[in-house]
Structures are given as structure tokens and as C-alpha cells.
Amino acid sequence: MSVAISVLVVEDNFLVALDLQMSLEEMGFVVIGPAGNASEAVRLMQVSLPHAAVLDINLGAETSFGVADELAEAKVPFVFLSGGTRDTLPQRFKSRPLLEKPVQIARLYDLLSRVRA
């Protein structure tokens, strides 16, 4: 029996978050969230630690880097999403996967599928 992989989605744009949620669920993942800001994401993580996460970098007036720090500490893999480039990432996250928006769902699936192994 296969265990469902849970993915935390952190995205402040409602339509993008909804699209990600639907796409991930169609791929067989269980979505936690989506969370529209960092504090909501942390609260959701405290309720149920995900197997992986998808983090929009810019969440309005804040970033998701604090959430990424908590995920890294818990050894939960994550993927950043951004309309920008890798140059926007702090040094500690330079080696983390970054997908440019609009997200290529096949590429996201490829990255998240590695969690299943």
C-alpha cells in the first residue's frame, strides 16, 4: 500500500494557489493549505508536518524564507517558486530547487516525485 505524500503549498496569489492545489491533487499528492502567508504556513506545519513543500518566495510584504528555514531544520524538502531569478535567494538556499513562474507542472511533478522514493 502506498502512502500519500503531503505537500504544503505557500502562495499568496489565490488563483495560482488554487491552480497548484488542483494540479498537485491530480498528481496524487495530498495538499496542506494553501497558505497565503508565512505565519499561516508555520501554523499548518505545526498541525501536520508535510513530506514536501512548494514555496512562493514573495508573499506580499514578506518572503517565505522563514518557512524555508523551518522546513530545512525539519529536513522537509521544498521547491521555491518565483517570477525572479536564483539571484533573489539568500546564500543558504542557492542549492535549493527554484521553478520560475508560470510553473511547468511536469517539472514540479518531477521534483516532488523524488520525495516518493
Image (cartoon, grey):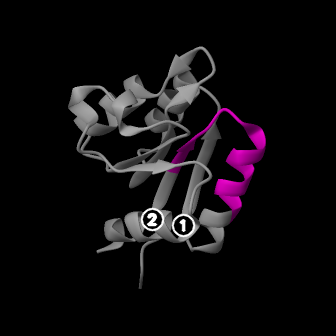
Residue 99: x, y in percent?
46, 51
The quadrant of the image that shows the N terminus is bottom left
Q: Are marks 1 and 2 in contact (CB under 8 Å)?
A: yes
**Residue at screen point 61% across, 38% down:** 11
Left or right: where 71 falls relative to 7: left
Q: Nearer the viewer, residue 34 or 90?
A: 90
Magenta region:
8-22
What residue sits right under mark 1 in the picture? 29
- Indicate the secondary structure of the residue bearing disc 1: loop
**Residue at screen point 55% across, 27% down:** 58
Question: Taken as a whole, is the magenta stretch helix, strand or loop?
Answer: helix
Q: Is residue 51 above or below residue 38?
A: below
What residue sits right under mark 2 in the picture? 5
Q: Quadrant of residue 26?
A: bottom right
Residue type at tag 2:
Ile
Q: Is residue 3 above or below residue 53?
A: below
Residue type at tag 1:
Phe
Residue 73: x, y in percent?
23, 34
Left or right: where 99 falls relative to 33: left
- Indicate the secondary structure of the residue bearing disc 2: loop
Mark 2 Cα-neighbour bin, 10 Å: few <14, some 14–19, many ≥20: some
**Residue at screen point 41% across, 64% down:** 112
Residue 113: x, y in percent?
40, 71
Residue lying at the far right in this picture: please name it: 15
Q: Nearer the viewer, residue 52 or 82?
A: 82
Q: Nearer the viewer, residue 64 or 74?
A: 64
